[in-house]
Amino acid sequence: MLDNLDSFTYNLFQLTAELGFAATVKRATETSLEAIATLKPQKIVISPGPKRPQDHPFIFEVLARFAGSIPILGVCLGMQAINEWHGGTICRDTHPMHGRTSVIEHDGSSLFEDIPTPCEVARYHSLRLDGVAEEMSVIAWTSDRIPMAIQHRSWPLFGVQFHPESFLTPHGKTLLRNFYRL
């Protein structure tokens, strides 16, 4: 689990443990690609974090090294970084969503298996996807069509704009379980 200096990282870590999966947290500012590779991760979760993806260049290094070979889930900032890494864009949201819930719909793909549509999710962000990268598919969205989850067209690479680890996301545990079972 790549920690981008965000307190929600440890909520993700705790939820991962509750699901019976082992995880190691590596702070992005204090680790290296070699240190991560030495762990031989079966999955990588890119945590939320402050600011813009460009302020977290190590995320892009992790994506360049591991995307396509190890399933990766980006949460909030992680999703924004995945989209930008593939050439998509983000913008400042006209209505910042800090600690607010939204109802989303999804396509029922593997990440959303056993999760009803529509469903409620917790949002904590000021930035959102503006242009979705060509290699990515939108798999969940708000009623006004703001992307809430993306998936690479051929790799096990996913992003969610919302926070599955929040108590305000009733089906977040199921979503994380689905990711870890890939």
Image (cartoon, helix red, strand yellow):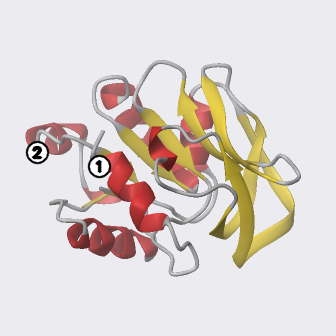
What percent of the width, then of the height, locates residue 86? 59, 25
- As measured in the structure, the alpha-carbon distance from the residue carrying label 1 to the one carrying label 2 is 16 Å
Local crowd size for mark 1, using a 10 Å CA cut-off: few (<14), some (14–19), many (≥20):
many
Q: Is residue 28 visible?
A: no
Q: Secondary structure at mark 1?
A: helix
Pointer 2: what residue? 39
Identified at 29% across, 49% down, the residue is 180
Q: Kindly report which numbered mark, 1 or 2, lies closer to the viewer in this rendering.
A: 1
What percent of the width, then of the height, locates residue 77? 56, 54
Pointer 1: what residue? 180
Q: How many marks?
A: 2
Identified at 52% across, 63% down, the residue is 49
| Chain-order first, disc 1 or disc 2 | 2
What percent of the width, then of the height, locates residue 117? 66, 55
In terms of depth relative to the viewer, which is nearer, 6 or 98?
A: 98
Picture layout, residue 18 above or below residue 134: below
Q: Secondary structure at mark 2?
A: loop
Identified at 64% across, 53% down, the residue is 52
Q: Which residue type carries mark 1? A: Tyr
Identified at 85% across, 54% down, the residue is 143
In terms of depth relative to the viewer, which is nearer, 82 or 176?
A: 176
Q: Which residue type carries mark 2? A: Leu
